């Protein structure tokens, strides 16, 4: 697997399981097979592999997290949520599971529950950037504007060279009709991460909505070059 000889690795894992079909360690081999099948575009086979692994070793955190990630990749948020719930039932402070469960619940508009998970994660790790950004979004969507701005400002203070915070704050500022501040933050996000097409698209949309079509066209014309 480390040498990307995936077909050979797959054959050897299957041979190993035939040699000892009842071995408890086969859970690890099924998990390795799932990884190979996912990497080679055989996602449904990977899901079956994870099922087999969990039948041997129920509740194994690493396997549940890997399957949840695959479910998310396939757009099955409900199944992913079930796996993250199971992890957190066993380990209530598991940071990856808290973050991803909060993300899914935010997408489902379960804002109160998403906020609880983000806040739990931030109690464990007060400087967790993704949790700060997520909490800012949840508070903004939940009509808690002051808390949203306080949280995003905290994220930017902690990570002044990371573009995501500026782009998120720019969107909030635009909603509040703080157009000059929004323009500055979009510019900062683009300067920090010039190859990120989404930031330039967001600023182009901002310019269009504020009736500055020439500037919008300039951003749109640069998008192809920025992604190269």
Image (cartoon, grey):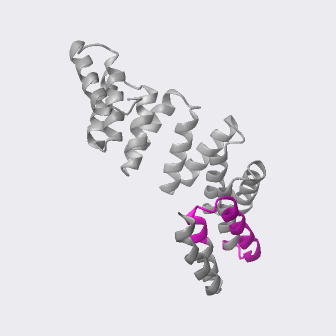
The answer to whether 81 appears left or right of 165 in the picture is: left
Q: x, y percentage for residue 172?
A: 67, 67
Range of the magenta residues? 175-202
Quadrant position of residue 123:
top right
Q: Nearer the viewer, residue 109 or 166?
A: 166
Q: Nearer the viewer, residue 1 or 215?
A: 1
The answer to whether 12 appears left or right of 77 in the picture is: left
Dividing the image into 4 quarters, which one contains the N terminus? top left
Find out whether residue 184 is within the magenta segment: yes
Residue positioned 35% across, 28% down in the render: 32
Quadrant position of residue 117:
top right
The answer to whether 182 appears left or right of 83 in the picture is: right
Residue positioned 63% across, 86% down in the render: 214
Quadrant position of residue 57:
top left
Q: x, y percentage for residue 85?
A: 46, 37
Residue 12 against residue 46 in the figure, above or below: above
**Chief SS of the magenta region:** helix
Check the image and name the residue furthest to the left. 18
């Amino acid at each position: 697997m480390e040498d990307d000889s995936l077909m050979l690795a797959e054959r050897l894992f299957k041979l190993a399981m035939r040699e000892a079909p009842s071995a408890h360690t086969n859970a690890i081999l099924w998990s390795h097979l799932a990884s190979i099948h996912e990497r080679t575009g055989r996602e449904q086979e990977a899901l079956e592999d994870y099922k087999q692994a969990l039948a041997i070793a129920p509740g194994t955190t690493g396997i549940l997290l890997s399957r949840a990630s695959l479910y998310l990749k396939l757009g099955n948020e409900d199944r992913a949520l079930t796996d993250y719930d199971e992890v957190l039932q066993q380990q209530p402070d598991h940071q990856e599971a808290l973050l991803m469960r909060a993300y899914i619940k935010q997408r489902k508009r379960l804002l109160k529950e998403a906020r609880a998970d983000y806040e739990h994660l931030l109690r464990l790790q007060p400087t967790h950037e993704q949790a700060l950004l997520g909490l800012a979004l949840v508070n903004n969507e939940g009509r808690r504007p002051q808390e949203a701005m306080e949280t995003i400002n905290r994220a930017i203070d902690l990570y002044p060279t990371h573009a995501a915070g500026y782009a998120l704050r720019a969107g909030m500022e635009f909603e509040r009709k703080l157009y000059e501040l929004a323009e500055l933050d979009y510019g900062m996000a683009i300067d920090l991460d010039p190859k990120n097409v989404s930031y330039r698209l967001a600023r182009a949309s901002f310019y269009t909505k504020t009736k500055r079509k020439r500037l919008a066209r300039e951003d749109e014309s640069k998008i192809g070059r920025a992604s190269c």
